[in-house]
Amino acid sequence: MFLKFRQTIVLLLTVVLVSGFVSCKQEGSVRFAFLTDLHVVPGNDNEHVLDLVVEEINKGDFDFVVITGDLTNMGSDEELHAVKDGVDGLTIPYYILPGNHETNWSETGGATYKKLFGADRFYFEHNGYGFVGFNAGPYMKMGDGHVKSEDLKWLQSELPEAKDIKLISMAHYPIADGLDNWPEVSEVLKAKGVSLALCGHGHRLRLMNFNGITGLMGRALIGKNKEDVGYTIVTLNGDQVFVEEKKCGQAAQLYRDWNLCGVSQIDTLPVSVMPSMQINEKYPNVAAQIIVNDDASVMGGFAMDGTIISWLSSDGYLKAFDAETNTVLWQEFLSTPQYATPTIYKNSVIVGTSLGDLKAFDLTSGTMKWETNVGYPVFAEGVIDNGSLYIACGKGGFTKIDPQNGRVIWTYNNIGGFVQAKPCITDKELIFGAWDKYLYCLDKATGSLNWKWTNGHGAILYSPGNVVPAVANNKVFIVAPDRYFTVLDLNDGSEIYRTKSHQVRESMCISGDKKHIYAKLMNDSIVAFPTHGKTHQSLWTANVGFGYEHNPCPLVEVNGVVYGGTRSGEVFAVDAKTQTTLWRHKISNSSVNKLFWNDGLWFNTMDGKIAKMKVQ
């Protein structure tokens, strides 16, 4: 089928190339090909179409090529190498950025991307124009996009103040709702005089209003119709902007043109609504005491022992902070980027790194106690059980460690994807999911496989890769990206029942008495299921009102109250007995990474805040 399609495209290409392009670069102007949302998997149509597009661009009249993310489907090494092979066929310079499919799912935490393509941000100038590109996340979990704090600072320092440079920005996400700190990003760009912002993500050619900046979303490599293949062409000539859609084998068609200094083309287009803290006025008895406000972003959670808090920042530091004295005890640079969550054992803080190391430091002094290389980047938080550390090691599978000296007791690595979430541990079993479509159950003592289960879906993106399972009454409970509530037999992994009656996704917890499973829905509500019996029916749902939601942060239940965190920096509490919302409080526009009970509810957000809730 694709062979016939390829032959048709090649024939059309020949006709167009012989007759010449409709639009041509004028002297003194800048003309570039704008590609986005390639979604290449080795052997798929997208890979072949990329080759055709590269061939066409090479025969055109362009200064360079820009590619704004979603290069792959899962960000795997194999996919990234396929993209690299494709774009390296270009005979002109190209500037490339990752998208959410590279940063959300990556077996190396972005390391392979950087090895192949270099930095995930750039600035260059050409013919009086400045072009700036930056990473917009999200980072190793489902959530909104996010421009890291250090990248915002870089934008402020890197972009010139000179008014004779016309600035064009590029990122995968639109600078709008869906990028959690879009107000801050847009203000930085506007202050620097950025007049045009290119993005991808939406797969269609579209003019947008990014808080007063003209936004241009590029078309995807392949449209909804598989024969709709192509890219976008942008020509800059003085203050004039010309945008064309270029379908392979066809003449370029003018989409829009405008004057950067003339009447705005976007005044009538919708602008994202500014985030509001108004919900806090409804619950004046609740306040968040910010204990830490890091000047870098935080991709993972935090660990806490007594008054000492430890976390990893996006600029590569492991830090320890005493909440009682309000002082930083120590910080240790590891490497960048970092996504893991520390684990505390006795007076040690243990953390996995993106370089494949497990390291233990003295919690109070920061002195390193031991170091073990596991060979693969670690994104996870470990679990201490009966004096042993159990921790996911990315593509290294799962490992049992002696937390006193770092000695590896056993490793299970018969997996086809990477592992990132905390496991569920019982008296005898260790249960975890991987980004290879499977949920695994191991013998906790030996690391041998008891069973593995798959939902049967062909897409790896529906794997139970970032959900913490729960066990009760000899049953295993999960809520994966397939949006099913799934119940399995603990003994053999056979399905007891699955239901899609509620749109659950990754975020759940079990009650302290193990009688109920609570899960967060993708719109407004949480749901309760019983752990006894074999019923498909939920016990209740409670409408909290948090809106569209996909943050995988696990829920927490304490003394009959269910706590949750959202993609937009809001924390809420629901009374499980009455199903009423006790309170909601918004502290940030960035996702809540972790909830933790320590004589009160603590939580942290991606923009670097660690806080404790105060309820009167």
Image (spheres, rainbow, N blue to C red):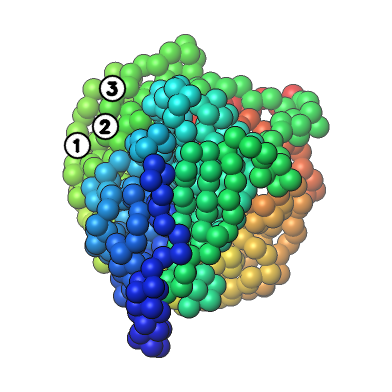
Q: Which of 234 and 416 is in front in this view?
A: 234
Residue 356, image x, y percentages: 23, 45
**Dot 2: within a 10 Å radius of its alpha carbon, few (fewer than 14), some, or many (20 or more) residues?**
some
Amino acid residing under circle 2: Leu
Q: How far apart are marks 2 and 3 (CA)?
A: 12 Å
Identify the residue at horizontal 41%, vertical 44% (top origin). Answer: 29
Q: Which of 509 and 492 is in front in this view?
A: 509
Q: Nearer the viewer, mark 2 or mark 3?
A: 2
Identify the residue at horizontal 22%, vertical 55% (top origin). Answer: 410
Point out which mark residue 371 bears.
Answer: 1
Kindly check if marks 2 and 1 are in contact, taking CB atoms under 8 A apart as contact. Answer: no
Q: Is residue 312 left or right of residue 273?
A: left
Q: Is mark 2 on a helix, strand or loop?
A: loop
Q: Is residue 239 above or below residue 527?
A: above
Choose top left, top right, bottom left or bottom right for residue 315: top left
Residue denoted by label 3: 366
Q: Nearer the viewer, residue 322 or 434?
A: 434
Q: In this view, does 574 lie to the left or right of 199?
A: right
Residue denoted by label 2: 334
Q: In this view, does 435 lie above or below 580?
A: below
Q: Is residue 329 above or below residue 508?
A: above
Q: Distance between the residues labelled 2 and 1?
A: 12 Å
Q: What element carries label 3?
A: loop
Kindly check if marks 1 and 3 are in contact, taking CB atoms under 8 A apart as contact. Answer: no
